[in-house]
Image (cartoon, rainbow, N blue to C red):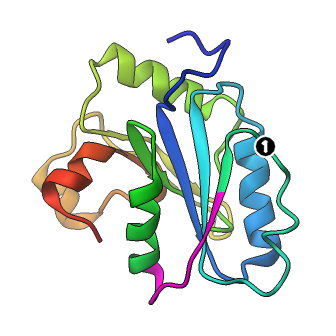
Amino acid sequence: MDCAAAPSTPVVSVVTVALNAGADLLATARTVDEQDCPAFEHLVKDGGSTDGSIEHLADAPYRRVVRAPDEGIFPAMNQALAECRGRYVLFLNAGDGLAGPGVLRAVVERAEGAEWPEVIYTHFLNQRYALQIEYPPVLNRAFLYRLSVVHQACYIRRDCFERYGHF
C-alpha cells in the first residue's frame, strides 16, 4: 500500500476510550500523531470527561471524537466499534502509545502482504514496568495457556467483531 496519501477508507482504526484521562490521553494522541502513514483514523470515545482533556487534543483530519455516556469501559469500546471505519481495529488505552512513527505503516504493509488476515499481532513493551513481550511467529495453545496477546498489540479485522461478537 502506498502510504503517501490517505486512502478513502482507513486501513486501521486506532480507538482510545477515555474518561477524564488528562495527560495520559494527550500522550497517547501524540504517538498517534507521529505516524508516517495516513492510512488510519484515530477515534477517541469519550464518556463525558470534565477535565478538559478532550478540548486539548490537537485537531487532525484523521481524528474523530465521539462523546456519549456509557456504562463502563467495555460498553464504551462497543460504542467505539460501531463508529470505526477501518478494516482493522486497535484499542490503545489512554496512557499507551505506539512505539515509533513507522508502526502503523509496518502493520498496513504486513496486512496487505499477507492478504488481510483476521488478526495481526505485534510485540509489546510496557515501559512503566520494563516488561517486553516478544510473541512467537505463530501462536499455539501452549503459549496462550501461559500468556495472552494484549489488546494494545493486537490488530483485529473489524468484520471479526461483527461475526464473533463484541466486548
Q: Name the image quarter holding the C terminus.
A: bottom left
Q: What is the total number of numbered labels drawn onto the structure image? A: 1
- For the point 74% across and 54% down, the residue is 29
Indicate the position of residue 158 as horizontal and vertical percent values.
32, 46
Q: Is residue 50 above or below residue 130?
A: below
Q: Residue at x 21, y 44 (%)?
A: 139
Chain part drawn in magenta: 65-73
Disc 1 residue type (three-letter):
Ala
89 relative to 126, above or below = above
Residue 167 seen in render: yes
Relative to 150, 103 lies left or right:
right
Instruction: Report the front residue among 143 and 16.
Output: 16
- Residue 81 quadrant: bottom left
Q: Nearer the viewer, residue 62 or 154?
A: 62
Magenta stretch holds residue 67: yes
| Lateral position of residue 117 relative to residue 73, left or right | left
Q: Is residue 93 left or right of residue 81?
A: right
- Which residue is under mark 1? 60
**Residue 118 spot, x, y in % from top left:** 24, 38
